[in-house]
Image: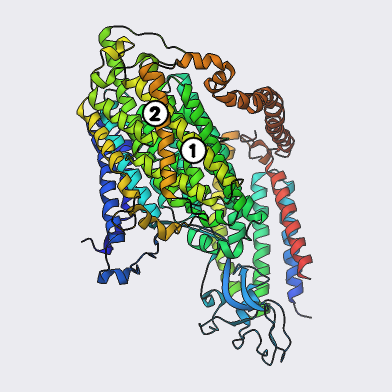
Amino acid sequence: MIPSTWLQLLPLVPALPLLGVAVLVLGGRRLPDRVAATVAVGVVGLAFLVAVAVGAAYLGPGAPERAEAGVPEGPTRPPVVQRLWQWMAVGDDLVTVSAALRPVAAGQAVPAGAVGEMWASPWDPRVAPRLRDMWSAAAVPGQRAGDAGLAPYAIVGIGDVAPDPGPFVAARPKLQHRFQVDVALQLDGLSLVMILLVTGVGFLILAYSAGYMRGDPGLRRFFLYMDLFVFSMLVLVLAADFLVLFVGWELVGLCSYLLIGFWHQDVANASAGRKAFVVNRVGDFAFLLGLLLVWTVFGSLAFADVLPNAGRLLPLGGALATAITLLLLLGATGKSAQLPLYVWLPDAMAGPTPVSALIHAATMVTAGVYLIARAAPLFERAPLVMLAIAGVGAATALAAALIALVQVDIKRVLAYSTISQLGFMFLAVGAGAYIAGIAHLVVHAFFKALLFLAAGSVMHALAHGYAHAGVSPPAQDDVPAQQDVRRMGGLLRRLPLTAWTFVIGGLALAGLFPLAGFFSKDEILYETLGRGQGLLDPWVALWAVGMVTAFLTALYAGRLLLLVCGGGPRGEGAGRAVEPSAVMTAPLVALAALTVAGGLLIVPLAGREAPLAALLAPVLGQHHAVGDPSKAAVAVAATAASLLGLGLAWLAYGRGALDPARIARAAPWAYRLAWRKFYVDELYALVFVRPFRAAAPFLWRVVDDRVIDGAVNATGRAVLAAGTGARRLQTGYVRSYALFMLLGAAVIAAYLLLSAR
Amino acid sequence: MGVSAGHLLALAAVLFSIGLAGVLLRRQLILVLMSVELMLNAVNITLVTAARWLVDIDGHVYVFFSLSVAAAEVAVGLALVVTVFRALGRSDADDADTLYG
């Protein structure tokens, strides 16, 4: 049994990946590739083990040490906050002495509000001298003031601390800066789930990368970024403070930029990285504004100060709550690739495939969902925004699923499926079903990491196949041959291990019983329907959208599986594909096992609460549906939708009874719309990019060249002119200098004489 | 009528002014140096006067210091004048303008 003192190891979890970064940075070229990869993968594996140990210590049954650590047992297990160091302390101090804030005449009752806390700087000349001088008997509102009355700012008592007649600074019993941020880590059920996910799935992805990236000249740089990515995500989920969370949030954005543009020799990759960064910045800016609002309302950014007080300080449905949560929501849509900021994620395919797996599964995109779950008490104060979250989620899920239906790039299909699945998570957290949302996040991380790594394995195998065949077919529709599902097929026979794990992942994505994806998606649909009352309720409509999306998901998942694995090879690459090495297939098997068994985390078994729900409920609260739809009926409906989708996919791509091309021709505009991704990129180009492009020459030639450079040059010229003028004073005659000294001395003497009077 | 502090301060002021005028108006370095000495001694007189007036020994001590420093300063100053004379062939303050930009 692990004692609770092991909780002290918590900082090691993010520190280990950071150590990996440090080793790779300092080691540089001296490190052989093999060592670099081992270190990078090893530290994340170690971090996972530490996270497991810390989790066990956190959840372990009560030992004597537990009481000392202040962690009571039971379902109301409070979060453990470890303060590492003070990051910043700005502004006045909160002088928590009671101070008379206005004068009170002697003998009068001290009115409420005359005694209280105040913000003051000890150096404030208006306040400090009075505070220093005036001590009087402890006064309480309602009591009569002493003989002399109370002067403003008289310190009249300090709670239970006796007045100290010493200097003011020493007399402050408690100091709190107006803006104070501590670097602190918070461990509770939610962050525990997240760190286990990030380090666990991250470790599998990194281990896989060791095989996938072998021989790449930038291998050390790759692993450096990957470790940094894991570190950033751990900072994000372990933060006990919105600002530290924001640091992780930004670091994650930076890492995505670095990794998406990893092969930056190709301009397209570099600009994809830039796109991810810029689009994310839009959301980040909103997030930052939201944080400023949070601080104005709560006076603090620490979760412990903000979240429990949300109910008290934010009126339900008020403008303030709506503004804060809307801004946070916009930030979340940026990171989690939801409408309207999802456009970066499909382009994020430009990075190496393990990067996509990391971004889509363990890190980055889950941040938005995590944020909403973490800040749930804030979101609860704005029901309208909750509905907006669910609406955004449902709309994104539906749109992305439609797009995924027609894409031919294997990675692109998966990317849109991620967007769609994230939409499901948003739907869940919008419905207040945080546990269902986080559960889907976890399960999705399993099967999406699996799908991406398997897709990487397929591409790897196909690239080898093409190399064996000695052909390199050109890219079609900008899709390289080894990523083009139209040239795959028959891989179930050529790459049994990869293809079977891919099938497991795909079926989980489709939500097929008893794979993990079924349970989590079912839970979301159930909770959404449960929110609705009556048929015309918006939640019922959202549930319907969710059902349609579930059907579409099964359809495109089935299409992808059949195109990749079924039938016969449709290209030399697929025909000569070779299974990759065990370094790459072992993580696939592990993830497939997780995908199969993941349902056990979500389902209550043998009368016991589901493990994930038991962990999360103390943080997120148990969710109770308003209505009470039959769980079995929802499950049957969802399964029917999946089976319908898979069946339709089989008819079209397996059996050939339906010709997809004919369907596309029947509604060419619909097909085009989906093929061109609803023209959102084009719309953004028109609305944002083109105006900026048009404005750029003006900004360059006029604003930069004329105004800014002009101002700088004018300053320079002014200084030059002043110097030329002042040069004349320098005659070179010692006597004139002596005269200037005399004049200066005379001026000073005159000032002293005149001011002395 | 004895010599009062006012007289002594007036004498010091006159001496100081003469010295200052000498520094500002004369070009011969030796004379400039002599004028500086004059100013220095005017200040010394002021210090001694103040010390007597306030019955405080500090002023006398200052004067001893300033006298000894003045001796050293004259030695350095004369050496500089000699050097300037050797370099330029004259000892005119306005000729020493090598550093003028």
> What is the crowding at mark 1: few (fewer than 14 residues within 10 Å), some, or many (at least 20)?
many
Q: Is residue A4 above or below residue A102?
A: above
Residue in the image at 43% along x and 45% along y? A633
Callout 1 amino acid? Met
Q: Position of residue A530 (x, y in %)?
A: 50, 51
Which of these two is toward me, A362 or A156? Answer: A362
- Would residue A593 be found to the left or right of residue A518 on screen? left
Locate the N terminus of chain A by quadrant: bottom left
Judging from the image, what secondary structure is the residue with disc 1 in? helix
For disc 2, the marked residue is A646
Disc 2 marks a residue whose amino acid type is Leu
Q: Residues within 10 Å of mark 2 (few under 14, many from 20)?
A: many
Which quarter of the image is occupied by the C terminus of chain A?
bottom right
Asked whether the residues under the numbered discs 1 and 2 touch, taking CB atoms below 8 Å apart as contact, a structural biologist would say: no
- Chain of the residue under the numbered disc 2 shown in the image: A
Relative horizontal placement of residue A480, taking residue A379 as reference (left or right)? left
Q: Which residue is mark 1?
A: A547
Local secondary structure at mark 2: helix
- The relative height of residue B97 versus residue A484 in the rendered view (above or below) is below
